[in-house]
Image: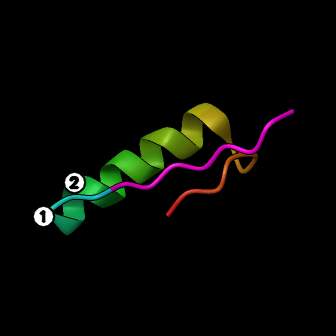
Amino acid sequence: MSNVGIVIVSHSPLVAEGTADMVRQMVGDEVPLA
């Protein structure tokens, strides 16, 4: 399996946190998230 990571960039900390929460719900802890 290849390595996958996701980087979230936003001017709004709340949008970034909400997006990160949504991604974690979909992929769990298997994909690194920054």
Question: Which residue lies at the image location 66% right of the left edge and 43% below the top edge?
Answer: 4
Is residue 5 inside the magenta stretch?
yes
Whether the residues at callouts 2 and 1 have beta carbons within 8 Å, the answer is yes
**What is the three-letter code of the residue carrying label 2?**
Val
Side of 21 where 2 appears, left or right: right
Q: Residue 19: x and y, percent?
A: 35, 46
The part of the chain drawn in magenta is: 1-8
Side of 34 where 16 appears, left or right: left
How far apart, in angstroms, are the residues tagged by discs 2 and 1? 8 Å
Secondary element at image label 2: helix
Question: Which residue lies at the image location 44% right of the left edge and 55% below the top edge?
Answer: 7
Query: What secondary structure is the magenta-colored segment mainly?
Result: loop
Number of other residues with Cα within 10 Å of mark 1, as a class: few under 14, some 14 to 19, many 20 or more: few
**What is the three-letter code of the residue carrying label 1?**
His
Question: Which residue lies at the image location 49% right of the left edge and 64% below the top edge?
Answer: 34
Which residue corresponds to mark 2? 15
Q: Quadrant of residue 12?
A: bottom left
Number of other residues with Cα within 10 Å of mark 2, as a class: few under 14, some 14 to 19, many 20 or more: few
- Disc marking residue 11: 1
- Figure colour scheme: rainbow
Q: Residue 22: x and y, percent?
A: 44, 40
Question: Which residue lies at the image location 75% right of the left edge and 45% below the top edge?
Answer: 3
Frontmost of labels 2 and 1 is: 1
Secondary element at image label 1: loop
Is residue 6 inside the magenta stretch?
yes
